[in-house]
């Protein structure tokens, strides 16, 4: 959450590419977010 609040693009990208065990629905959410992270980061910055 701190990476988002601080608008630290490098940490956000690192977190997106990290691997952690999550449920099926969260996995789909992360995949969707990865596809759209450029747009999301643009809005945050």
Image (tube, helix red, strand yellow):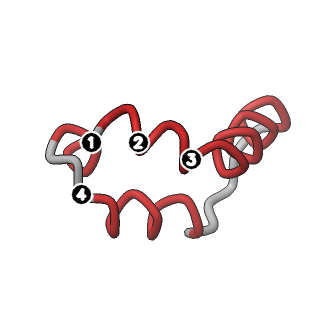
Tag 1's secondary structure?
loop
Residue corresponding to mark 1: 45
C-beta proximity under 8 Å, tags 3 and 4? no
Which label was assigned to residue 8?
A: 4
Which label was assigned to residue 42?
A: 2
C-beta proximity under 8 Å, tags 2 and 4? no
Q: Answer with mark 2 or mark 4, whichever residue precedes in sequence.
A: 4
Residue 21 is drawn in which quadrant?
Answer: bottom right
Name the foreground residue: 20 vs 15: 15
Spatial CA span between label 4 and label 1: 9 Å
Q: Give residue 42's position: percent from left, percent from top.
A: 41, 42
Residue corresponding to mark 3: 37
What residue sits 20% from the left and 45% below the top?
2
What residue sits 59% from the left and 68% below the top?
17
Tag 3's secondary structure?
helix
C-beta proximity under 8 Å, tags 1 and 2? yes
Image height of 17 relative to 25, above or below: below
**Of marks 3 and 1, the one in the foreground:** 1
Q: Give residue 22's position: percent from left, percent from top.
A: 70, 45
């Amino acid at each position: 959450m701190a990476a988002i609040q601080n608008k630290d693009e490098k940490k956000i990208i690192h977190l997106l590419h990290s691997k952690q065990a999550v449920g099926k629905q969260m996995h789909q959410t992360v995949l969707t977010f990865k596809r759209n992270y450029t747009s999301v980061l643009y809005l945050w910055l």
